[in-house]
Image (cartoon, helix red, strand yellow):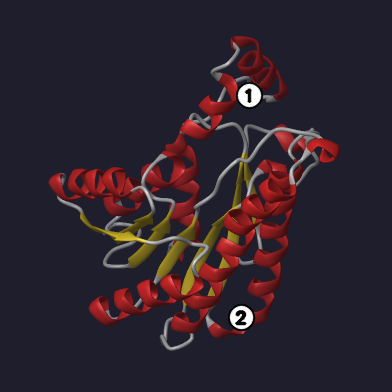
């Protein structure tokens, strides 16, 4: 029996990077995976890949900043399959690298809208659905190692990811007695398109990042996906309110 047999799980930002890898892992563990994103072509291709290997998946166009759209998507999933057993709220953007004096207000608003308000929108709608389910549910949010420490030059991203940790802990306490668990993963440097946008300009940047990590390597997206699968599963039923670093020891220093 797989870890997530017949669970219906929503993955936002599921078309690439950590979301893509996690969607595949959840499917391999027996879940019916709903990939939600604004990258429609990539999302549909991923669903074809999952289904082609015997998994159960479908794609939904969903913008996490659109609260009504999020609510309608979750309602449609619940009506079709009877429940939303789990959710991985992973959609996010990195924003520019700049000190606060050079950080544009429009960039601040954009990063916070996607990375924090987007998670809020998803959690709020997911909680409403899970409260109707006798078995509750499990929610995992993507924060970051940058949500646990300060990193100069990442004003909007750091602030949003710290906010995700606070939101996770608050909602976890609010619904712990309702069979709804809420946790966060805090990835370090992961081999994703987001990291490449930062490091492709210079090999020295990548080398400097790796030097910061005690394990002296960048993680693969699947290493985050495995942690998410565990947090969504019944192997972690006494775990809630946790912000779990998956970062090669970076924030332990």
Mark 1, other Cα within 10 Å: few <14 / some 14–19 / many ≥20:
few
Q: Is residue 150 visible?
A: yes
Quick one: quadrant of the C terminus?
top right
Image vertical order of residue 114 relative to residue 22, above or below: below
Residue placed at 57% from the left, 63% from the top? Answer: 119
- Report, in whole angstroms, how far the alpha carbon at label 2 lies from the one at label 1: 36 Å
In the rendering, which numbered label is found on residue 215?
1
Pick whichever of labels 2 and 1 is earlier in the sequence.
2
Query: In x, y percent, where is residue 108?
Result: 71, 50
Query: Which numbered dot is residue 241?
Result: none
Residue 175 image label:
2
Residue 198: give x, y in percent of width and height: 59, 26
Q: Is residue 71 above or below residue 150?
A: below
Instruction: Please provide percent x and percent y for residue 32.
Output: 27, 62
Q: Quadrant of the N terminus?
A: bottom left
Residue 100 lies left or right of residue 123; in this view the side is right
């Amino acid at each position: 029996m797989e870890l997530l047999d017949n669970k219906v799980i929503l993955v936002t930002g599921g078309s690439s990077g950590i979301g893509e890898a996690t969607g595949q892992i959840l499917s391999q563990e027996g879940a019916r995976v709903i990939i939600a994103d604004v990258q429609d072509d990539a999302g549909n291709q991923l669903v074809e890949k999952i289904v082609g290997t015997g998994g159960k998946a479908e794609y939904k166009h969903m913008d996490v900043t659109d609260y009504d759209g999020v609510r309608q998507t979750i309602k449609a999933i619940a009506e079709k399959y009877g429940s939303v057993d789990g959710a991985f709220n992973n959609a996010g953007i990195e924003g520019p690298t700049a000190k606060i004096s050079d950080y544009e207000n429009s960039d601040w608003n954009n990063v916070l809208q996607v990375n924090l308000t987007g998670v809020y929108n998803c959690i709020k709608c997911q909680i409403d659905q899970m409260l109707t389910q006798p078995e509750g549910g499990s929610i995992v949010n993507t924060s970051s190692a940058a949500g646990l420490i300060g990193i100069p030059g990442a004003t909007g991203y750091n602030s949003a990811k710290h906010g995700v940790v606070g939101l996770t802990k608050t909602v976890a306490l609010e619904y712990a007695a309702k069979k709804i668990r809420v946790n966060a993963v805090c990835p370090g440097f992961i081999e994703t398109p987001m990291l490449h946008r930062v490091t492709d300009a210079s090999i020295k940047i990548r080398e400097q990042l790796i030097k910061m990590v005690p394990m002296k390597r960048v993680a693969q997206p699947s290493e985050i996906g495995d942690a998410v699968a565990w947090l969504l599963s019944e192997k972690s039923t006494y775990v809630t309110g946790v912000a779990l670093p998956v970062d090669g020891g970076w924030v332990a220093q």
